[in-house]
Amino acid sequence: MDGIAWAQSAMVAARTRLEIATDNLANVSTGGFARIAAHGALTPNGVSISRSREAASAPGMPNGVDAIAEMIDVLAAERSFESAQKAVAAIDQSRQKSAEAARIQ
């Protein structure tokens, strides 16, 4: 797996984490909603995210969703996406320099 494919899988995983966290945040005061947890894993094909519903709710939270924790997850997912985006830009820049060096010779 090359760097671009790995970064692409990381960006998809970050987007999935963001979707999960924003869904949980949007339903923070919805009765009957069960929090969805995101579980990340490194695989031979890159980064993957799986979803699972959490059954237990914390005291004071009718559906087990902690708004502050979900906002932290949103920020973490955004930072992960940005990091993968920077990796793609760096790889692209390296490939461009290599192509220029090959043309000069």
Image (tube, grey):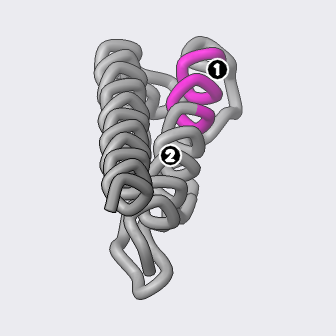
Residue of label 2:
11
Q: Are marks 2 and 1 in contact (CB under 8 Å)?
A: no
Placement of 31 over or under 10, stated as above or below: above
Front-most of residues 86 and 67: 86
| Percent x, y of residue 88 | 42, 45
| Residue 6 visible somewhere in the drawing | yes
Residue for point 37% across, 28% down? 82
Label 2 sits on what residue type? Answer: Met
Q: Position of residue 34 (x, y in %)?
A: 60, 41
Q: Is residue 33 above or below residue 69?
A: below
Q: Secondary structure at mark 1?
A: loop
Tell me the magenta residue range: 19-26
Q: Report which residue position mark 1 lands on.
A: 27
How packed mark 1 is, by other alpha carbons closer than 10 Å (few <14, some 14-19, many 20 or more), is some
Depth check, mark 2 against mark 1: the one in front is 2
If the image is split into quadrants, where does the C terminus sit? bottom left
Count of numbered labels shown in the rendering: 2
**Viewer-closest of 29 and 24:** 24
Q: Position of residue 86 (x, y in %)?
A: 34, 34
Q: Report the predominant secondary structure element of the magenta stretch.
A: helix
- On the rendered structure, is 26 left or right of 95? right
Q: Write the residue at 51% across / 60% down.
A: 9
Residue at 40% x, 25% y is 78
**Which of the 4 quarters of the picture holds residue 98?**
bottom left
Residue 54 visible in the snapshot: no
